[in-house]
């Protein structure tokens, strides 16, 4: 009977041997889902129905006034870990465009250039481009509330510094 089972059901045995344990992959995907879910809840986003296209936020007179009021230069020194140099940053908002520079050096020399946008809800999305591989590059979202631009991120250098900024409009 076992011989008949092996002869008749050999494709099933090969298929069983070929499957991998997907526990690690499923764990990674669940972690990514949880991160996206947390992000949408903390930003108070509403997700479109499955299959429906997402619609960008429609500007309102209030949001247009908020963006106009946000125009100006935001600068300051960030806080960081004890083993890191305190960074400085300057961001200029003009309309819905952001530009600036980050310094991770005590001399204040620019280590990353910044470009980005501000949306209708006051979220400022900044793209950092390091002057070389030793300096921060990446995307960071910040929040604009009144005359304060707040953002946090972790550098990708060997020392992996955590940076937090509350940039004052001045």
Image: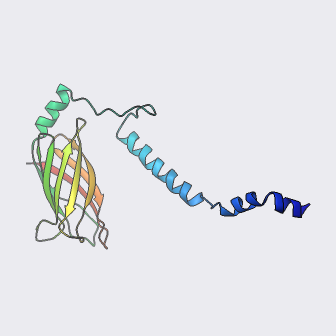
* Residue 114 sits in quarter: bottom left
Colour treatment of the image: rainbow
Residue 119: x percent and y percent? 22, 39
At x 77%, y 61%, the residue is: 10
The residue nearer to you, when weighing 19 against 65, is: 19
Give the left or right position of residue 30, taking residue 13 as reference.
left
Split into 4 quadrants, where in the image is the N terminus?
bottom right
At x 44%, y 43%, the residue is: 37
* Residue 71 drawn above or below residue 8: above
The residue nearer to you, when weighing 162 against 112, is: 112
At x 14%, y 44%, the residue is: 97
Give the left or right position of residue 164, taking residue 25 as reference.
left
Can you name the residue that lies furthest to the right here?
1
At x 10%, y 71%, the residue is: 107
* Residue 23 sits in quarter: bottom right
* Residue 74 drawn above or below residue 54: below
Can you name the residue that lies furthest to the front here?
7
Residue 101: x percent and y percent? 14, 59
Instruction: Count every numbered label the image shows and give the total.
Output: 0
Residue 27 visible at all? yes
The residue nearer to you, when weighing 141 against 167, is: 141
Residue 90 visible at all? no
């Amino acid at each position: 009977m076992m011989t008949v089972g092996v002869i008749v059901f050999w494709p099933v045995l090969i298929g069983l041997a070929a499957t991998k344990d997907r526990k690690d992959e499923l764990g990674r995907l669940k972690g990514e889902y949880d991160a996206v879910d947390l992000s949408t809840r903390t930003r108070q986003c509403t997700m479109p129905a499955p299959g429906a296209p997402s619609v960008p936020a429609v500007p309102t007179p209030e949001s247009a006034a908020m963006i106009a009021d946000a125009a100006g230069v935001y600068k300051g020194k960030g806080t960081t870990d004890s083993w890191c140099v305190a960074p400085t940053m300057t961001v200029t908002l003009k309309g819905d465009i952001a530009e600036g520079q980050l310094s991770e050096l005590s001399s204040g020399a620019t280590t990353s250039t910044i470009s980005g946008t501000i949306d209708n809800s006051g979220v400022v999305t900044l793209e950092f481009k390091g002057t070389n591989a030793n300096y921060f590059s990446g995307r960071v979202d910040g929040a604009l509330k009144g005359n304060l631009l707040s953002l946090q991120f972790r550098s990708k250098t060997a020392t992996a510094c955590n940076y937090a900024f509350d940039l004052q409009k001045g």
